[in-house]
């Protein structure tokens, strides 16, 4: 049986942590680099977002400012496109790219993009699973007998829902970036060479989602390995 304080599978957790840290550092570094390059159009993130929304026939989405750095997000519940301090009033190619990406989510919502719908339906399940999974698994390891196996398996099942959410998020994010890059050039907001710079920013951002999904998968595999070892030793 794996020791409570010494567990060789911790290396899987460490790999996940390192992957996420590298992805986070990369997106921050890339965004900072291209946030110093002003777009030829001189449009701010807010102006670009509004233009792209209207170009796609969307007039019921409100563009507003939110505090923070790279806290940009689209909220389908109240149809608000929230741009962070580093994006809202900035005229950089990085800021316009991020704003366009969030517009991509608004377009997905307006067009009924299936993966976005699936992700939305998974939100309550994923939140519920991520909240209860670890307490159940921990209790399962602290007790003995059939109840132990039941709780551990239930915890793993709930954690799997959170992992599934991370996986479903990937096509949603990649598609939003693809829509953004096409729209920016089609609508004349960025020149071709500027779109290339923006692509680097959005690619770096996408890698953070890939890293999160990979980390979650590694954690799930670790739990399955530990659970198997527990059953063999019971």
Image (tube, rainbow, N blue to C red):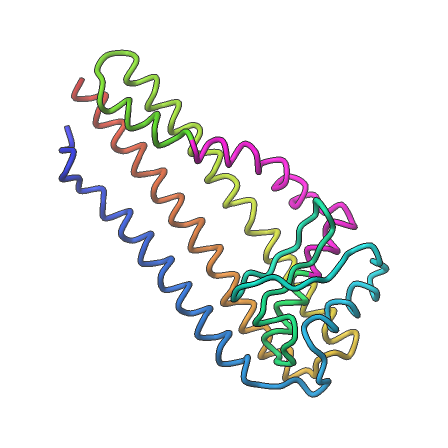
Q: Whole-percent x and y of residue 8? A: 17, 42
Q: Whole-percent x and y of residue 49? A: 73, 67
Magenta region: which residues? 103-131
Query: Which quarter shows the N terminus?
Result: top left
Compared with 165, 202 (above or below) is below
Q: Whole-percent x and y of residue 141? A: 24, 24
Compared with 105, 225 (above or below) is above
Q: Please name whichever residue, 83 or 56, is drawn nearer the observer in this view of the structure.
A: 83
Kindly identify the residue that appears in the image at 70 percent across and 80 percent down: 190
Kindly identify the residue that appears in the image at 41 percent across and 50 percent down: 214
In the rendered view, does 31 fall on the left or right side of 120?
A: left
Quarter of the image for residue 232 reads top left
124 in the magenta segment: yes
**Residue, far top:** 146
Q: Whole-percent x and y of residue 21? A: 35, 61
233 in the magenta segment: no
């Amino acid at each position: 049986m794996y020791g409570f304080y010494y567990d060789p599978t911790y290396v899987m957790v460490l790999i996940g942590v390192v992957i996420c840290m590298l992805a986070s550092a990369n997106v921050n570094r890339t965004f900072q680099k291209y946030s110093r390059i002003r777009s030829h159009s001189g449009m701010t993130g807010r102006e670009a977002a509004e233009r792209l929304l209207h170009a796609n026939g969307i007039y019921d989405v409100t563009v507003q400012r939110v505090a923070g750095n790279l806290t940009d997000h689209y909220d389908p519940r109240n149809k608000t496109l929230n741009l962070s301090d580093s994006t809202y009033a900035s005229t950089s190619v990085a800021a316009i790219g991020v704003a366009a990406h969030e517009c991509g989510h608004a377009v997905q919502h307006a067009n009924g993009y299936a993966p976005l719908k699936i992700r939305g339906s998974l939100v309550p399940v994923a939140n519920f699973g991520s909240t209860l999974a670890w307490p159940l698994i921990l209790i399962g390891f602290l007790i003995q007998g059939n109840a132990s196996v039941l709780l551990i398996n239930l915890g793993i099942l709930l954690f799997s829902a959170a992992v599934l959410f991370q996986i479903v998020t990937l096509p949603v994010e990649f598609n939003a970036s693809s829509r953004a890059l096409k729209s920016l050039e089609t609508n004349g907001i960025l020149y071709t060479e500027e779109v290339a710079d923006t692509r680097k920013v959005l690619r770096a951002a996408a890698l953070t989602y890939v890293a999160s999904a990979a980390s979650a998968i590694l954690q799930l595999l670790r739990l399955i390995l530990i659970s198997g070892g527990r059953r063999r030793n019971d």
